[in-house]
Image (cartoon, rainbow, N blue to C red):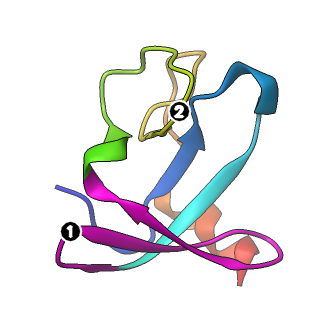
Amino acid sequence: MLKASHVLYDNDPRYRGRTIVVVRVDGSHAICKSVSRQVKVRLNYIFSDGEQRRSGYSTIALDGTSAPASLSVYYY
């Protein structure tokens, strides 16, 4: 279950290390905050299996670890 303050990792191999933080979940979208802007991501583009894809976001980093929720405080 996706909740506020979860860290999402970009699945695209061209953008390694890019993360966004979930601010809130509205219906079929997650409102997320990156360092410089707020983005709206569809929930069906958020995966929890850690597989590498060309698009979408993952709750697990590509190296198999997940960040603690306390990491999100640095983005606000």
Label 1, on which residue?
28
Q: Marks 1 and 2, how far apart in space?
A: 17 Å
Label 2, on which residue?
55
Q: Vertical placement of 29 versus 52: above or below?
A: below
Q: Secondary structure at mark 2?
A: loop
Identified by mark 1, the residue type is: Ser
Identified by mark 2, the residue type is: Ser
Would residue 70 be found to the left or right of residue 13 on screen?
A: left
In-front residue for pair 16/71:
16
Residue 53 coordinates in the image, percent (x, y): 50, 19
Task: Say few, some or many: other residues with alpha carbon within 10 Å of mark 1 (under 14 / 14 to 19 / 20 or more).
Answer: few
Q: Secondary structure at mark 1?
A: loop
Q: Vertical placement of 25 versus 61: above or below?
A: below
Magenta region includes residue 28: yes
| Sequence-earlier tag: 1 or 2 | 1
Q: Is residue 68 visible?
A: no
Residue 41 coordinates in the image, percent (x, y): 44, 62
Pick the quarter of the image with the C terminus. bottom right
Residue lying at 43% horizontally and 14% vertically, measured from the top left: 51
Span colored in magenta? 25-43
- In the figure, residue 42 lies in which quadrant? bottom left
Q: Is residue 6 visible?
A: yes
Residue lying at 28% horizontally and 56% vertically, measured from the top left: 43
Magenta region includes residue 31: yes
Q: Vertical placement of 33 versus 63: above or below?
A: below
